Amino acid sequence: MNKIVAIDGPAGSGKGTITQIIADKCHLVNIDTGATYRCVALAALRHGLTLDDKEAIIDLSSKINITFDETGHVFLDGEDVSEEIRGKEVTTFVSPVSSIVEVRTNMVALQRQMALGHDVIMEGRDITTVVFPNAQYKFYLDASLEERAKRRYAQNQEKGIEMSYEEVLDNIKKRDYNDMHKEVGSLIRTDDAIYIDTTNMTIDEVANKMINIIEGD
Ligand code: DC
């Protein structure tokens, strides 16, 4: 059976960075499920759609082609959109888009299909609960709201994304609310997922702790 490491947690909990480190060290395929929702949001924006065009967004989510390469770059219909999907516009639009039940059905099917035949590490909001509830390794990463906003602000600065700390904090608060109040696929901390509070831990400390668990048996 293929190895599946499932990770959930709120925005800014360190999931993305830590998942890539573990993927490299443990030779696992990294499937960034948030990026799949971001691609749907980007495609919808490019088609000039708004949240009033729910049916058109659902239709688009079943037609677009989303792929990853081995370095973690994301392609929408063959075009590398890795940077564009992290921009402000997509970041604001993606949360409500990811709340559309039918969009989730399409993305969950795609994510499961991407995992077929590979040893994978997958991070998102509903991986331990919906996508792979029977994964061998399940983690829930967390950190305080302020710490998460601080991290995301620093990441944005590095990437040249113009957003004030207050804007980032506000965005994360709204996303937390949306992520935890979805009709389907809400972010839920379950008892069988290993809980790690990363607030006062370095990235390497968290990654090493998880690698010890994954490779410990
Ligand atoms: O992890 P991220 O910030 O790239 O996620 C982008 C959005 O997609 C975020 O609003 C939460 C949502 N998401 C989701 O609903 N389910 C997932 N498995 C992953 C992300």
Image: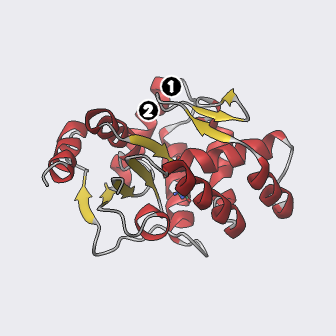
- What type is the residue that disc 1 sits on? Lys
Q: Badge 1 is on which residue?
A: 159
Q: Do the residues bearing badges 1 and 2 touch, measured as CB atoms within 8 Å?
A: yes
Kind of element beneath mark 1? helix
Instruction: Residue at 75%, 45% (x, y): give it.
Output: 64
Picture coordinates of residue 158 (x, y %)? 45, 24
Q: For residue 128, what is the image quadrant? A: bottom left
Say above or below: 72 vs 66: above
- Taking the image as four quarters, which one is ligand 1 found in? bottom right
Q: Badge 2 is on which residue?
A: 155
Picture coordinates of residue 191 (x, y %)? 28, 75
Picture coordinates of residue 201 (x, y %)? 19, 45
Tally the marks.
2
- What type is the residue that disc 2 sits on? Gln
Q: Which is nearer the eye, 174 or 198?
A: 198
Instruction: Residue at 32%, 41% (x, y): give it.
Output: 18
Q: Which is nearer the eye, 202 or 8?
A: 8
Say above or below: 76 vs 123: above
Kind of element beneath mark 2? helix
Q: Which is nearer the eye, 163 or 28?
A: 28
Picture coordinates of residue 214 (x, y %)? 21, 51
Q: Is residue 141 left or right of residue 201?
A: right
Q: Is residue 106 left or right of residue 31?
A: right
Q: Quadrant of the C terminus?
A: bottom left
Within 10 Å of disc 2 (Cα), the crowding (few <14, some 14-19, many 20+) is few
Instruction: Residue at 61%, 76% (x, y): give it.
Output: 183
Q: Is residue 13 left or right of residue 102?
A: left
Work out how far the residue at label 1 is from the one at label 2, CA to CA, in angstroms. 6 Å
Query: Could you tell me if residue 52 is visible in this image?
Result: no
